[in-house]
Amino acid sequence: MNDLDHSAKAQQRTYTVKVAQDKAGVRLDRVLADAIGELSRARIQALIADGQVFAGDGPDGPEVSEAKRKAKAGEVYTLIEPPPVAAEPQPQDIALDVIYEDDHVIVVDKPPGLVVHPAAGNLDGTLVNALLAHCKGSLSGIGGVARPGIVHRLDKGTGGLIIAAKNDAAHQSLSGQFAAHTLKRAYYALLWGVPKPLEGDIEGNLGRSPRNRKKMAVLKSGGKTALTHYRVLENYGGLVSLVECQLKTGRTHQIRVHMASIGHSVLGDPLYGGSDKTRARLLPSAALARVESLTHQALYAYKLGFLHEKLGKEIYLEQEIPSFIKEIVCELETV
């Protein structure tokens, strides 16, 4: 094996890099960028963040979560660059539930099932396509061609409030608030069981699961700091609880992973164990039918607060409990 081998399959590129003696102690992202001249250091950092870099000769090795880790001579790393995605999403007439809009920002209530931006497997029919049509192309370009205006994301199966920037100044302001964790976000979640204590914080660094690269996990080392504050709002016979979750940080799948890590996964969550056969057997038949009919996790971003620098004031938006949660709660109130 040479210092750098790469192959292409269906436009996906796989690079294998062996760390040379003179690269020992150098940051891994720099080592990979030097070895793979066609990929920038920033691109490699993004691929590490997306779980596309592995220790070892192939993607079956443990994922690398830190770009700054020091490389050791003789180590082997595998980097996978996914196939390119169409660069320019087109406007599409997709209905939007607009909660707030002015010349600088737009906030919509995203329905569960709607993908935020184009990516492999979802090249159109996304929130970005809808925003391009609604805003007549007036969206910030900072997010890149494929993600115009997008400041943050919600999982495909998570509904609720999401904000987009219409110009670069608004994008920079909102991105700064996200980075400083000053932007207010809260979610309603239906969980299996009742967390104890009834209110508290869950801390635990999140990163790609070493066992399943499609999942995130609480890691003993590495990953990114994550903090979720939860508060139980209603207890339905100890079987299910309605919980408010506030994000103190914003990591991929954060609420879903954190709640599952303490044994109380979100109902209907297809990735982190959104079923509990023991408790499900004790639910009234009508409630169980509602739960089993869920096609996505019972998680909804109901509150959003941000500083509107152009207007010089803070804006707080709040939505009611959505129908897909209300319908289950109504059947649980008899428990």
Image: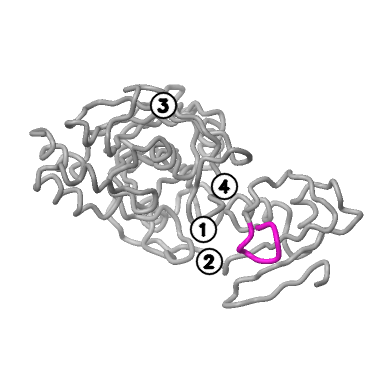
Pair 2/1: label in front: 2
Side (left or right) of 55 relative to 192: right
In magenta, the rendered stretch is: 54-61
Query: Spatial distance from mark 1 to mark 3, Cα to Cα?
Result: 32 Å
Q: Which mark is residue 142?
A: 4
Task: Say which of marks 1 and 3 sits in front.
Answer: 3
**Left or right of residue 30: residue 144:** left
Return the x and y of residue 12 as percentages of the image width and height: 60, 71
**Residue situated furthest right in the rendering:** 22
The nearer-to-camera label among 2 and 3 is 3
Residue holding disc 1: 146
Q: Please state which of the two labelled residues, at mark 3 or mark 4, is closer to the viewer.
A: 3
Report helix, strand or loop for mark 3: strand
Provide residue 70's location: percent of width, then percent of height.
78, 45
Q: Earlier in the sequence, mark 1 or mark 3?
A: 1
**Sequence order check, earlier mark of 2 and 1:** 2
Q: Kindly report the distance in space between the C-alpha atoms of the residues bearing marks 2 and 3.
A: 36 Å
Find numbered disc 2 in the image and state the secondary structure of the residue it sits on: loop
Tag 4: residue type? Ile
Q: Is residue 93 magenta?
A: no
Which residue is the site of mark 3? 229
Q: Secondary structure at mark 1?
A: loop
Quadrant of the image containing the N terminus: bottom right
Q: State how far apart marks 4 and 1 are (Cα).
A: 10 Å
Magenta stretch, overall SS: loop
Q: Residues within 10 Å of mark 2 (few under 14, many from 20)?
A: some
Residue 286, position in %: x, y? 9, 47
Residue 228 is marked as none
The image quarter in which residue 187 lies: top left
Label 2, on which residue?
A: 85
- As drawn, is 66 to the left or to the right of 286? right
